[in-house]
Amino acid sequence: GAVVSQHPSWVICKSGTSVKIECRSLDFQATTMFWYRQFPKQSLMLMATSNEGSKATYEQGVEKDKFLINHASLTLSTLTVTSAHPEDSSFYICSARNSGTRNQPQHFGDGTRLSIL
Amino acid sequence: GQQLNQSPQSMFIQEGEDVSMNCTSSSIFNTWLWYKQDPGEGPVLLIALYKAGELTSNGRLTAQFGITRKDSFLNISASIPSDVGIYFCAGQGRGANSKLTFGKGITLSVRP
């Protein structure tokens, strides 16, 4: 079945560090992937839509220079949190769907827990 | 942004009981999805619905795409302890790559 892999699963780093999170579709190609942020006891909040070979589309209020997205291949999207600060600490989750087949749902990665000290 | 209506926020049931969760929207969706999330993990797809009126089962789970395309329900029969988790509904508009709109989620607790 469709598998989305996210790496790393947990990151702890100092304030000011840039952190890159990878999202891979393991057994399908995805022209579009999505990046979410989730705070404790809340629902998923869409940050941006990652488009293969073109610029990402950011949701209102999400700083594109803060959260850099690159979708260079049909199986990989990366989210880089630049100059991370404690307020960026959160659970980041990506999703992808098989773009080669009709009626394919989005599948999610296991998430990345980011803690900025 | 828009959010789907899921309530109550928490549900407590006895092992072996059936439970039903509803999700409503003020807007029409072309696809309805139900996900379950365990602590510290990403959501896992339970059921995807693509046609108004569609009724789909996955083991002890049954979900329906409302005929008005503004609601969906999920039933869990004969609950077991591993059913504990947060259940999210999500709607998707026209377009295979259109974004999902989520409900706030329902936290299900199952008493042994």
Image (cartoon, coloured by chain):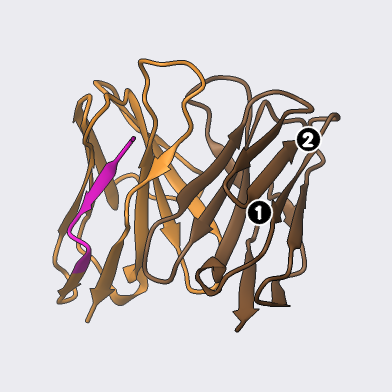
Chain colours: A orange, B brown
Give the chain of mark 1: B
Vertical arrangement, residue A23 with respect to residue A88, above or below = above
Q: Is residue A22 left or right of residue A43?
A: left
Range of residues picked out in magenta: A1-10
Across and down, in percent, residue A53 comes to 24, 21
B80 vs B21, left or right, is left
Q: Chain of mark 2?
A: B
Earlier-in-chain disc, 1 versus 2:
2
Q: Is residue A28 above or below residue A44?
A: above
> Which residue has dot 1 on it?
B103
Rendered residue at 27%/68% (across/down): A114
**Residue under numbered circle 2:** B27
| Relative vertical location of residue B42 with respect to residue A79 in this rendering, above or below | below
- Dot 1 amino acid type: Gly
- In depth, the one of A60 and B31 nearer the eye is B31
Q: Residues within 10 Å of mark 2 (few under 14, many from 20)?
A: few
